[in-house]
Every structure is written in structure tokens, then in C-alpha cells.
Image (spheres, rainbow, N blue to C red):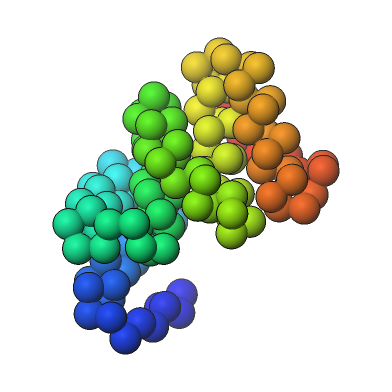
Amino acid sequence: MPRKQTENPKEAEALAFAQKAIEAGVDGHHAEAVKHWQAASDYADSHLSGADIDHWIKSGLGAALYDSGAYREAIAVSMKALDWCASHKHPLPAITLARSYRRLGDHAAAQTYLDQARFLAGDPNLEIWEED
């Protein structure tokens, strides 16, 4: 996977944590992915708070929390990233919110965020549900 390049050394450090998280997630090591995403998020909170990359990292952390079964935590983190990501047409937080609410049995909230994810993705037929 090609690495994103940045001139900002603090962004480069945050991206290094994120790269480890992505690799762990792809390999199915969800707890390890959460650990690396959390390190990236903590670093971004300390050094890049409010920067674009901070929101991108939060969206990745939310998705990793979902993958690890921490649905309430996934909702809390994804909510922090939702507005920024929506303003940039990035549907990941909305997808994570829809999936998490569905797993928790709140189908009305799940539908709300599914509709938002479909709008952001530009695909009214987007299916995001995983097999139970």
C-alpha cells in the first residue's frame, strides 16, 4: 500500500501510527489495529488537534473499534469525525455509526446514518451490512 507523503513531521508521525493500524486491520488483528489507531489519535490530539488528519484518524479509530466489537466506543469516536468527514464527502464515520447502531439494536439510528453514508458515497443502493 503506498504511503501518503507529507512535509509536516508531526503529520508524518501520525501517519506512521495509522499505517501500522491499517496493516493490523487488514491482517484481521483488530485489537492491535485499535491500539495503533488509538496511538495515532492520542498523538494527533497532542500535536495536530483540529487538523484534517486528526479527523481522518478519528474515522479510522471508529471503524477499528467497530471491527473489535466496541460499538458504543465506535459511536463516540465516529461522532467526533462525522461533521468534518461529511463536509469532505468521506462516508466512513456514517458507515461506522450505521453499523454500530444496528449491532446495538437501534435500527432507526442505523437507518439515519445509512442514508447519510449513501448520500456521501453518491450511491443510493450502498449496502454496508456485514453477515451476522
User: Does 130 sit above or below residue 132?
Assistant: below
Q: Quadrant of residue 21?
A: bottom left
Residue depicted at 43% across the width and 31% down the height: 75
Residue depicted at 38% across the width and 49% down the height: 58
Residue 100 location (% of width, % of height): 50, 28
Residue 41 location (% of width, % of height): 27, 52
- Residue 97 in view of the camera: yes
User: Does 102 sit above or below residue 25?
Assistant: above
Which residue in the rendered view is the most extreme toward the bottom? 7
Count the marks.
0
Residue 52 location (% of width, % of height): 41, 63
Residue 15 location (% of width, % of height): 31, 69
Answer with left or right where residue 108 lies relative to residue 83: right
Q: Which sits in the foreground, 19 or 58? A: 58
Answer with left or right where residue 50 lies relative to residue 123: left
Residue depicted at 68% across the width and 25% down the height: 111
Q: Which sits in the foreground, 106 or 80? A: 80
User: Does 97 sit above or below residue 121?
Assistant: above
> Which quarter shows the C terminus?
top right
- Residue 20 in view of the camera: no
Which residue in the rendered view is the most extreme toward the top? 105
